[in-house]
Image: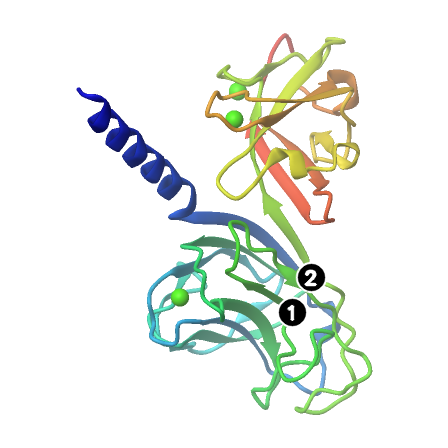
Amino acid sequence: MNNQMRGRLSRLVVVLVCMGNTAIAGAVYDITIDTSSLAGHAAQPFSLAFQLTDGSGVGNLSSNVRVTNLDLGNGSSVGTSMALGGTTGDLSVGLNLSDSTFLNAFIQRFTPGNFVKFRLNLVFTPEASETPDHFSFSILDNSGVSIPTRAGTPVDVLGSLDFVQDLPVLQVFAGDTSRSPVGGGGPIDLVTPIAELLVVMDIKPGETPNSINPRQNGRVPVAILSVSGFHARSISVNTIRFGRTGTEASPSQSALTDVNRDGKLDLLLHFRTQESGIRCGDITAVLTGTTTSGMAIKGADRIRTVSCR
Ligand SMILES: [Ca+2]
Ligand SMILES: [Ca+2]
Ligand SMILES: [Ca+2]
């Protein structure tokens, strides 16, 4: 191979690597909406609404949102749903929204329970478009208008994000108690929904299964991996908790190091086993915390407890 060819080849490799980093990005969020303030309200029946608009205006299929793991608490969905544009599936099997047209939406009437929980799986190609693709979710009243939220009119959404960067940041909004819903009754005091970004986590990096002896005074190493769009260095280390439910141990040690040797620095943490609350027979351990910008993160991994007899 001559030098010219080598030069061309290395440029090609650079282009391919760049494409690999920006071609497709993704993020997974777990959402919890406290719906207890909706029970028996005059503006019922309510509907859950999801919407994806295409910034290009022509439906260029650059963004995809999957809604899965729906849990209506002790509530239930009622009647048939309505789907617009690039929407397939439903809330029981999983919902898929693609920006195949300008407006893509899904509306399902429901009887509210204590909460609504679902998982959002976002896969998209970041675009340099002036108007980004936009996703939102809201609760509509019996008139088909969104319940007032602090996102403000005319949108009144509970959560929204723009597909602008590698990692779109989901914003969440509480109900606006200064305005009454169009459908009747007084203002609805919805608390701010919880949005948790799921991180990729590896207990005992490089080892499987992740054996933990709950009776030992050891330390458990846990890695949070950097992935496309998410840098482990954006984590606020002193907010991290790890253990049986994700509220227990604080890290006793932390370091930025490339744990899985993919060229991106990961966050390697150590926790004292005795502070983790892990008991014999537990099969998962959970980690929670926030990023330096205040976004909630959550991760989980399987464990196997040993020396328990
Ligand atoms: Ca688009
Ligand atoms: Ca492991
Ligand atoms: Ca890495």
The N terminus: image quadrant: top left
Q: Is residue 53 left or right of residue 269?
A: left
Q: Amino acid at mark 1?
A: Leu
User: Does label 2 or label 1 sit earlier along the sequence?
Assistant: 1
Residue that extends furthest to the right in the rendered view of this protein:
178
Up/down of 72 relative to 309, above or below: below
Residue 112, numbered circle: none
Between residue 36 and residue 171, name the one nearer to us.
171
Q: Is residue 116 left or right of residue 243?
A: left
Q: Is the CB atom of the residue marked by disc 2 within 8 angstroms of ligand 1's nearest atom?
A: no
- Tell me which corner region of the image, top left, top right, bottom left or bottom right, holds residue 102: bottom left
Up/down of 202 relative to 293, above or below: above
The C terminus: image quadrant: top right
Residue at the (66%, 12%) spot, across then down: 213
Label 1: which secondary element: loop
- Contact check, label 2 and label 1, Cβ < 8 Å: yes
Q: CA distance from mark 2 to mark 1?
A: 7 Å
Residue at the (36%, 43%) spot, across then down: 19
Q: Is residue 24 left or right of residue 283?
A: left
Residue 78: x %, y % from top left = 50, 76
Residue carrying label 2: 193
Residue carrying label 1: 158
Label 2: which secondary element: loop
Q: Amino acid at mark 2?
A: Pro
Residue 87: x %, y % from top left = 37, 69
Residue 259: x %, y % from top left = 54, 20
Q: Residues within 10 Å of mark 2 (few under 14, many from 20)?
A: many
Q: How many marks?
A: 2
Residue 40: x %, y % from top left = 71, 80
